[in-house]
Amino acid sequence: MNLRRIIQLVAAALALVGSQRAIAEDAREIAWKELAPASDVEKLASMQVMALLRAAPHGAADDVADSMQAIQPGMYGVIDALDGESIALSGFVVPLDFDGGASREFLLVPYYGACIHAPPPPPNQTLLVRSKTPVKLGALSNAYVAAGTLRVSQNSSSMGDSAYLLELSSLSRHR
């Protein structure tokens, strides 16, 4: 991965952070930085860029994917006031289960390639999303808007750790 591609990924993540629009009447769209305590917000951008740079020179894609969780920055600080709130958040999907193009459990991350081609974002910038019914997914490069009830909940998966759980009520393509 070259520096130009890293800059493109960071620019895409920043574009999602600034996206503010109504998704559902009862869901408040939040930005990724709202999931982290103020003391962590300044660290986020530089940590994500450094994590991407560390992953870039490694060998084969499989080797990079195998080492992703070890590279994940460990920021677990959360905003307890968000627990139980109905929110909507734009991001990219990393399926944890995948059956016939549908998934019931996936990670929502702020930038494309996180957990697969690049290190996972910090846990407080990673949501474990659970759906009662399987949701059809398109290309993993598509940005989505996930809406539902947010829970403060530490979770671990083979793709990375998360500090939040989103009980999914809707998933739509980001426009």
Image: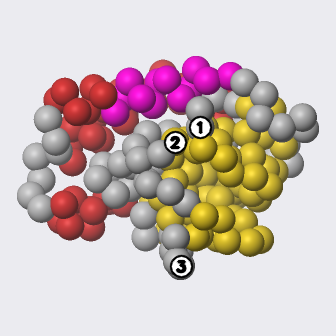
Q: Mark 1 = which residue?
A: 174
Residue 98 appears at what percent x and percent y?
A: 51, 74
Q: Is residue 17 magenta?
A: yes
* Marks 2/1: CA–CA distance: 5 Å
Q: Residues within 10 Å of mark 1 (few under 14, many from 20)?
A: some
Residue bearing the label numbered 2:
143
The quadrant of the rendering that contains the C terminus is: top right
Element on which disc 1 rests = loop
Decide if residue 166 is in sight here. yes
**Foreground residue, 73 or 84?**
84
Task: Give the residue at mark 3.
Answer: 99
Q: CA distance from mark 1 to mark 3?
A: 23 Å
Residue span colored magenta:
9-20
* Main secondary structure of the magenta stretch: helix
Q: Position of residue 39 (x, y in %)?
A: 57, 25
Give the answer, above or below, for where 86 lies relative to 50. Answer: below
Residue 32 place in picture, x, y as percent? 59, 33
User: In this rendering, is residue 130 above or below 72?
Assistant: below
| Quarter of the view holding residue 9 | top left
Disc 2 packing (10 Å; few <14; some 14–19; many ≥20): many
Q: Is residue 1 left or right of residue 29?
A: left
The numbered mark, 3 or 2, whose residue comes first in the sequence reads 3
Asked if 31 appears above or below 69 in the picture, the reply is above
Q: Residue at x 69, y 57 (%)?
A: 165
State how far apart marks 3 and 2 are (Cα): 20 Å
Q: Label 2, secondary structure: give it.
A: strand
Q: Is residue 14 left or right of residue 133?
A: left
